[in-house]
Image (cartoon, rainbow, N blue to C red):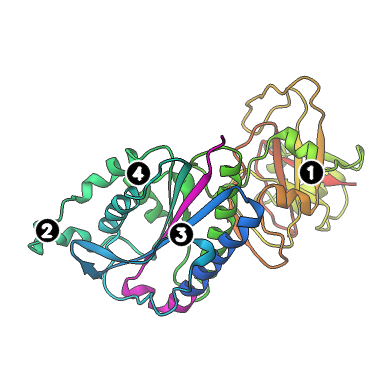
Amino acid sequence: MKANIVNHEVIILDASSSMQMHTSNVVKVTDALIQQLASQVSLHPDQETRITVYAFSSENYLDGRAYQCLIWDKDVLRVPSIAGLYKPHGNTALIAMTMQVIEDIKSIPVQYGDHAVLVYVVTDGYENWSHHQGNLGLEHWQYKTDQLPSKIGNLPDTWTMAAMVPGLAAKRVLAGWGFHGGNIEVWDPSRQDAMEEVGRSLSVSSAAYAGMRASGLRSTRDLYSMNAPSASAIQHVLTPMTPGSYYFEDVTPDDLAQIDNGRIDQFMELKTGKSYAPGNAYYQMIKRERIQHYKKLAIHVRSNDIKRFGGKTWNHPAGTPEGVYVGSGARNLLGLPDDGHSEVRISPPKAQGYDVYILSTSMNRKLYPGTKVLVMR
C-alpha cells in the first residue's frame, strides 16, 4: 500500500516588541495561510496537512521555553483564527526558540505514514536574548546557542527549515546556523504593509511544497524557487507557440558596451534599428526577481545539446523538440499565483532542459551578458 502523505507545517512568529506594528497583519497572514492549506486538500486529496503555530519572545519564557504554542499539530480543516492569541512584547529569543521547537516537533509520532516537516521562522530582527538564559539560574536549560547549526544539520531528510528575515545580513546569519540559503527569504519590516509580502511568499512556497510532496520528494533546499516541472511535463500540459512567431537575440558583451547600463530599450534599438515599445520582449530569468501579477512568463524548452546560461550543456532524451510556451498555463505550472493581484519575489526553477523568460514592461530593464531576449514578431 502507498503510505499516506502527512505534512506537518510549523509557523514560528516573532513576538518581540518591534512586531507590534504588524500585529493585525500577522494575524491576517497566518489565518490566510491556514485557509489556503485547507483549500489545498481538494487539490491534493492524498495529503493530510497539520499545522502548528508558535509565538516567541523573552516575555513568553515559561519552564525553560522562549515561546508560546498557539496551535499544536492540528488538522488545517479545523483550525481557528489566532486573533487574540498573538501579543508581541519583549526581546527576540530566536536561537532558544528554534532549538526548543525542533525538540517539540520531533516528539510528534511519525509511524505508518510518509511524514514530512516544513518549518517557517518569521522574524523582523536579530537574536538578542537567548544568551541571557545562562544568567537566569535555570538549571534545566539544556541548550547552548552554538549548538544550533549541528541541531539543524542532524535533522532527518524529511525536514525543511525555512525563514523570512529582515535583510541580507540576517540571511547570512541564519545560513551560518544551518538554514539553507534557498530556504531563506528577505522582507522589509519597516514597511507598514510588509506582512502582505511575507504572506505572498508563504502562500506560493507552501503551494509549491505541496506539489513537491505529491511528486514524491520529502524535503527541499530551494523552497523559495519556482516549481521545476520536467521539460516533458511542460510539453505535455502546454501548447507551444507557432514556430516563426518568435525569435531570440543573444546578449553579448560587445552589445552591452554600446548601450547604457544594459538597458533593454537601447539593446532592442541596436538590434532592430527601430524604436522600442515595451510589450513584446521577454528577458531571461537568471536570478531572484519580483514578479507582478500582470507579468507574462514564457518557458523555452531547449532542443538537444542547446547550452544553458553559464555554458553548461544538458543531454536531453533523443528527439526532444524545441518550443516556447506562454500564457497563464506557464505561470500555473511554475507555481506562480494567477489571481490578478498577487506579487511574488522568487528565484528561477532549479531545472534542466528549459529557461524561463519574463515579459519586460519597462524601458530600462537591465540585461546581462550571456543571456537571451525572447522577441515576439
Would you say 23 lies left or right of 320 here?
Answer: left
- Where is 269 relative to 63, above or below? above
* Residue at image mark 3: 51
For the question of whether residue 197 can be seen, the reply is no
Kindly identify the residue that appears in the image at 51 percent across and 62 percent down: 76
Q: Earlier in the sequence, mark 4 or mark 2?
A: 2
Q: Amino acid at mark 1?
A: Leu
For the question of whether residue 345 can be seen, the reply is yes
Kindly identify the residue that appears in the image at 45 percent across and 40 percent down: 112
Rounded to the nearest whole Å, what is the CA distance between mark 2 and mark 3? 32 Å
Residue range of the region highlighted in magenta in the rendering:
1-25
Rounded to the nearest whole Å, what is the CA distance between mark 4 and mark 2? 23 Å
Q: Nearer the viewer, mark 1 or mark 3?
A: 3
Q: Earlier in the sequence, mark 3 or mark 4?
A: 3
Q: Is residue 16 magenta?
A: yes
* Residue at image mark 2: 134
* Residue at image mark 1: 374
Quarter of the image with the N terminus in it: top right
Q: Earlier in the sequence, mark 2 or mark 3?
A: 3
| Mark number displayed over residue 28 | none
Residue at the farthest top position: 318
Rounded to the nearest whole Å, what is the CA distance between mark 3 and mark 4? 23 Å
Instruction: Answer whether labels 4 and 2 touch (C-beta < 8 Å).
Output: no
| Mark number displayed over residue 178 | 4
Q: Nearer the viewer, mark 2 or mark 1?
A: 2
Residue in the foreground of this view, choosing between 11 and 183: 11
